[in-house]
Image (tube, grey):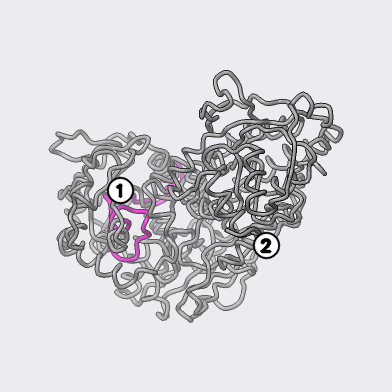
Amino acid sequence: MSNYTPKNILITGAAGFIASHVANRLVRSYPDYNIVVLDKLDYCSNLKNLSPSRSSPNFKFVKGDIGSADLVNYLLITENIDTIMHFAAQTHVDNSFGNSFEFTKNNIYGTHVLLEACKVTGQIRRFIHVSTDEVYGETDEDAVVGNHEASQLLPTNPYSATKAGAEMLVMAYARSYGLPVITTRGNNVYGPNQFPEKLIPKFILLALNGKPLPIHGDGSNVRSYLYCEDVAEAFEVVLHRGDVGHVYNIGTKKERRVIDVAKDISNLFNKDPDTSIQFVENRPFNDQRYFLDDQKLKNLGWSEKTTWEEGLKKTMEWYVNNPDWWGDVSGALLPHPRMLMMPGGVERNSDGAEKDDSGSSEISGNTKLNGMVVPASKISNSPSRSPYKFLIYGRTGWIGGLLSKLCEKQGIPYEYGKGRLEDRSQLLSDIHAVKPTHVFNAAGVTGRPNVDWCESHKTETIRTNVAGTLNLADVCKENGLLMVNFATGCIFEYDAAHPEGSGIGFKEEDTPNFTGSFYSKTKAMVEELLKEYPNVCTLRVRMPISSDLNNPRNFITKISRYNKVVNIPNSMTILDELLPISIEMAKRNLTGIWNFTNPGVVSHNEILEMYKKYINPEFKWSNFTLEEQAKVIVAPRSNNEMDASKLKKEFPELLSIKESLIKNVFEPNRKTSA
């Protein structure tokens, strides 16, 4: 057993859950230690977690990313750091299934940067690397002895794989360069301040709001839970008594099935578990059990002190008293959240500063190092400000203009992109200047007055619709940003498998079959390529309609001005209803392809009948066939039915196309008597 006394400790990820409890404990208990905390304030971090320490003279907060070698080297040297406790990581398994590259970037690359800085400066006496029990993989259900520190690493999901990869780097630097490392692998932790993407705070907040508790699969998965203060004490013990080169499991023998956790929380809120529990689809892979042998840590003098009942009660009381600690967490409370760089309870300002509601300053002024500016962390007393900021491309477009109005209505800060989509450097400048949480791409070439323009301007169409869109997706991916991309459903046409009038619509996974217009060709091409980007949410819009019947781009406005129209049932998008849903999809960080239409179909004649009934009883029109239409247009038009069941499942309140037309378009514009 060692007996180590640090002087200057750097704690990474210290505005997060576990690390904040460790930092607060060390600041409070060891006034002679200088504690420097580094955090980039990602979605699951919150400066308020460090409130107990901020007035202490031995505490300093620095906003920054462990992936910045310049910043890490600067801090190690200027703060004379001798000890690193490395907590910073992306940790939520659900997120790793949807955004695994971000986990590799944070958990492996970030760790590598830290290790290299330690090697270069040569001053680190302890490097405590915080890993997870999940690196061991699944434990046999009938195992009586848990995984010990020398057990084989067999990770089963992208998150645990990146943590195992980081451990391999740590081990390599210990052997190659003599870095004095200690690794910990811990069970699940719960308690106050935890971001509610995790099971226990999620269930508590859902129960608090009278909502069902979603359980993946049948709820038989077994987990071990430790209270946060017991875990903070474990790190205190490892710091002072842990032996260099060793691994320590931080665990408990007290296991619980997920369904039992849900029942316990239901009972705490005096709710009937049978009615408050909801079974949902399981994860792609959900380990049945993690079980640790924690005797080695106990030999250092640590033991678990908080009972399950006591810890759960304390946690519940904290969330009941602090329901708005994290701001809008609706996206995290979903059964299968996909959080993607969404700030929780922290406001990002246009100058790059961070704010919370404490009213005290962490660092005054900006620090310059090697030509880089480390922004000051300023604090404000405006907790009601939106945790989102949108960067919107397509300022002069119809959808881009409507998005800005919706942002203003919802109090969401936004800015329009100034760069051209095909210029990567301009896009990077936009992102660095605006510092958005999400990017919306409503830019694209559709042609004026219609898509026939694209037939004679093919290179311009490719430049924007294909190259520009891919450019923006790639820049967003590199910067950890979700991109909501407004695409088109005009890439399908009725065929033998999807005949007109059958009610069988094209699904998200179907291959586009319409190549009649060059516009549609480019949109189908880029959609296929965007499948390789896990950070993109593709929304297939069709024949968009809004309540603004004076807008020349409105499908109703168009056909009401034609002398003749075809009469074919089509899926369509009511923007008044669906654009707010696009913002909600961004908040939920949904990705993949979505048929962005109202359920069902409506024909040209049915729309014009409504127009006559609600707007102009004298209105008249006539029909012509597709063959007759072909004589007056350059490129054929797409006609199809889109299957909107995926969108309807996510948003059950979504109206059918005919219901939405009446409620959102014709009733508000009614000029006839009811």
Name the spot of residue 376 as percent of width and height, x first.
Answer: 58, 72
Q: Residue at x 77, y 23 (%)?
A: 627
Q: What's the residue type where badge 2 is placed?
A: Glu
Name the spot of residue 490 as percent of width and height, x first.
Answer: 66, 34
**Is 662 contained in the magenta span?**
no
* Image vertical order of residue 292 relative to residue 55, above or below: above
428 or 268: nearer the eye? 268
Q: Secondary structure at mark 1?
A: strand
* Image vertical order of residue 294 relative to residue 8, above or below: above
Q: Which residues are magenta?
A: 174-202
Point out the frontmost of discs 2 and 1: 1
Label 2, label 1: how many angstroms apart (C-alpha)?
36 Å
Q: Residue at x 64, y 43 (%)?
A: 607
Q: Is residue 3 visible?
A: no
Q: What's the residue type where badge 1 is placed?
A: Pro
In the rendered structure, which disc, 2 or 1, sits on the residue that comes first in sequence?
1
Residue at the top extreme of this rendering? 496
Left of 84 or right of it: where is 469? right
Residue under circle 2? 415
Residue under circle 1? 214
Q: Secondary structure at mark 2?
A: strand
Quarter of the image where the N terminus is located? bottom left
Q: Return the mark for residue 600.
A: none
Q: Residue at x 53, y 30 (%)?
A: 505
Quarter of the image where the C terminus is located? bottom right
* Image vertical order of residue 634 relative to residue 346, above or below: above
Name the spot of residue 652 as percent of width and height, x first.
Answer: 43, 47
